[in-house]
């Protein structure tokens, strides 16, 4: 057996920063009150991280790219029949990755248009009608339970894999995984400008989500004092 580097540093940082941002968003929304300011900040962090990962899935290293582990029907059949051989995400793990990216991204976007009817409103709430705001807010609350369920399933899968002798948490910390001692092509590393481009995509997503580009409403007309 030997070790090979599979997960590059940007992918590992994305994973653990997303864990921190989602945890912070969940805790802050349960606290309520002034903690809702932090709920919005954590939501913005989720948007930035998801945008980065989508870009990194196109421009990143070998095992960070979506084409490397996209769960095609052939890959799923090979995995279920025990004939799949590969590094990085398994086809079943890839389904989990895409589900979590999609659901956490959707939840964060819904939060941009949510309003609690008291004091807190998402930065883009002014772009939609009151009826639309109420609809998106309701879905923002409903989706929370779906996210809790998928996180629990993800944790259970980690336990099952660990009991079966596969270590998934360690490689996402140090980036290395154990393979049989046979020739394996080394993972291709991304270039520095690809990393900068992915960071730029994340920054652009945060700017759009912040609503800073929305023109302020015109000032109310001046009320002239009566002549008498």
Image (cartoon, rainbow, N blue to C red):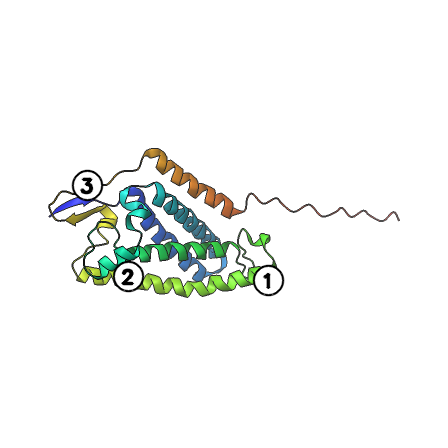
* Tags 1 and 2 touching, CB below 8 Å: no
Along the line of sight, the residue nearer the viewer: 53 or 126: 53
**Structural crowding at the residue carrying mark 2, measured as other residues with C-alpha within 10 Å and reported as few (<14), some (14–19) or many (≥20):** few
Along the line of sight, the residue nearer the viewer: 111 or 36: 111
**Structural crowding at the residue carrying mark 3, measured as other residues with C-alpha within 10 Å and reported as few (<14), some (14–19) or many (≥20):** few
Which residue corresponds to the image point at 50% horizontal and 48% vertical from the top-left? 209
Q: CA distance from mark 1 to mark 2?
A: 37 Å
Q: CA distance from mark 3 to mark 1?
A: 55 Å
* Tags 3 and 2 touching, CB below 8 Å: no
Which residue corresponds to the image point at 15% horizontal and 49% vertical from the top-left? 179
Q: CA distance from mark 3 to mark 2?
A: 31 Å
Residue placed farthest to the front in the image? 74
Asked where in the image residue 125 lies, by quadrant, the reply is: bottom right
Numbered disc 3: secondary structure: loop
Which dot marks residue 155?
2
Numbered disc 1: secondary structure: helix
- Provide the residue designation for mark 3: 185
Numbered disc 2: secondary structure: helix
Q: Nearer the viewer, mark 1 or mark 2?
A: 1
If you read the primary sequence from the N terminus, does the residue marked by circle 3 or circle 1 appear first? 1
């Amino acid at each position: 057996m030997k070790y090979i580097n599979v997960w590059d540093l940007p992918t590992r940082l994305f994973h653990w920063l997303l864990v921190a941002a989602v945890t912070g968003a969940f805790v802050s929304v349960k606290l309520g009150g002034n903690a809702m300011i932090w709920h919005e900040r954590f939501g913005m962090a989720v948007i930035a991280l998801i945008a980065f990962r989508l870009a990194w899935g196109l421009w990143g290293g070998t095992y960070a790219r979506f084409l490397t582990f996209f769960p095609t029907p052939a890959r799923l059949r090979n995995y279920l029949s025990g004939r799949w051989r590969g590094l990085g995400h398994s086809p079943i793990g890839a389904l989990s990755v895409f589900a979590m990216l999609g659901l956490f991204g959707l939840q964060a976007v819904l939060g941009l248009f949510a309003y609690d009817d008291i004091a807190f409103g998402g930065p883009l709430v002014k772009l939609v009608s009151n009826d639309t705001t109420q609809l998106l807010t309701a879905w923002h609350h409903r989706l929370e339970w779906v996210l809790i369920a998928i996180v629990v399933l993800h944790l259970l899968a980690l336990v099952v894999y660990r009991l079966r002798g596969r270590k998934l948490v360690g490689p996402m910390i140090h980036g290395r995984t154990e393979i049989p001692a046979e020739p394996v092509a080394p993972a291709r590393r991304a270039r520095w400008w690809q990393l900068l481009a992915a960071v730029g995509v994340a920054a652009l997503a945060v700017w759009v989500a912040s609503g800073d580009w929305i023109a302020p409403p015109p000032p109310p007309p001046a009320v002239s004092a009566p002549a008498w």
